[in-house]
C-alpha cells in the first residue's frame, strides 16, 4: 500500500490513525510545491470499504472527528469495546455528517443513536 494519495492534483502523505475491516481513518498532510496553493491542505479522510465511500474533513469537522475518537477511547474498556463504539459512531457520522459524537441525532426514545455503544 502506498503512503501517499492525490486530491485535486496535490500530493498528500497518508498516516493511518484507525483501521478495521470496514473503516480506515487517515491523516492527510500536504506535500506540495507549486504556484497555486490547493484549497484543501490538511485534514482527515474516512474510507468506508463496505459502501465504497470516501469523505475528507478538515477544520471544525476534522477537530470533531479527532475529539470523538479520543472520547470513545476514554469511555470504553478494551480494544474490542472501543472498536464497536467507533464502528457505530462512524456509521452514523457518515450518514448524518455530524462528526461530534456527543451531538449526534437522538432517536424517538431520546437516546443518541450511538450512545448505547459509546456511553455507559
Image (cartoon, helix red, strand yellow):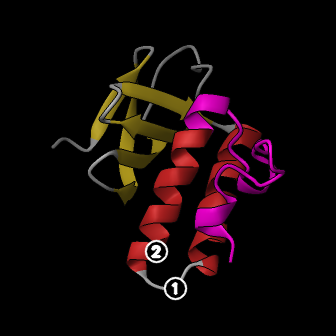
Q: Is residue 90 left or right of residue 98?
A: left
Quadrant of the image containing the C terminus:
bottom right
Residue situated in front as seen by the camera: 111 or 47: 111
Secondary structure, magenta segment, majority class? loop
**Badge 2 is on which residue?**
81
Q: Secondary structure at mark 2?
A: helix
Q: What residue is drawn where x is 59% and y is 20%?
A: 37
Q: Is residue 55 left or right of residue 47?
A: right
Residue ranking furthest to the front: 109
Can you say whether 48 is above or below 20 in the image?
Answer: above
Q: What residue is drawn where x is 53% and y is 63%?
A: 85
Residue ranking furthest to the bottom: 77
Q: What residue is drawn where x is 56% and y is 74%?
A: 73
Picture coordinates of residue 57, whole percent (x, y): 60, 35
Residues at marks 1 and 2 touching, judged by CB atoms closer than 8 Å:
yes
Query: Which of the 4 image quarters holds residue 71?
Result: bottom right
**Pointer 1: residues within 10 angstroms few (<14), some, or many (20+)?**
few
Quadrant of the image containing the N terminus:
top left
Can you say whether 28 is above or below 82 in the image?
Answer: above
Q: Is residue 105 left or right of residue 2?
A: right
Distance (Cα) linking label 1 and label 2: 6 Å
**Badge 1 is on which residue?**
77
Q: What residue is drawn where x is 37% and y is 47%?
A: 24
Picture coordinates of residue 104, whole percent (x, y): 75, 46
Query: Which of the 4 image quarters holds residue 49?
Result: top left
Can you say whether 46 is above or below 87 in the image?
Answer: above
Extent of the magenta region: 93-120
Amino acid at each position: 500500500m502506498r503512503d501517499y494519495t492525490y486530491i485535486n492534483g496535490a500530493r498528500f502523505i497518508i498516516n493511518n490513525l484507525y483501521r478495521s475491516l470496514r473503516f480506515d481513518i487517515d491523516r492527510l498532510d500536504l506535500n506540495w510545491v507549486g504556484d497555486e496553493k490547493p484549497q484543501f491542505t490538511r485534514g482527515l479522510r474516512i474510507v468506508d470499504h463496505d459502501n465504497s465511500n470516501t469523505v475528507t474533513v478538515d477544520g471544525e469537522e476534522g477537530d470533531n472527528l479527532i475529539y470523538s475518537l479520543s472520547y470513545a477511547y476514554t469511555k470504553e474498556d478494551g480494544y474490542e469495546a472501543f472498536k464497536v463504539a467507533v464502528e457505530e459512531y462512524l456509521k452514523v457520522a457518515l450518514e448524518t455528517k455530524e462528526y461530534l459524537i456527543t451531538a449526534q441525532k437522538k432517536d424517538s426514545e431520546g437516546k443518541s443513536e450511538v450512545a448505547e455503544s459509546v456511553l455507559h
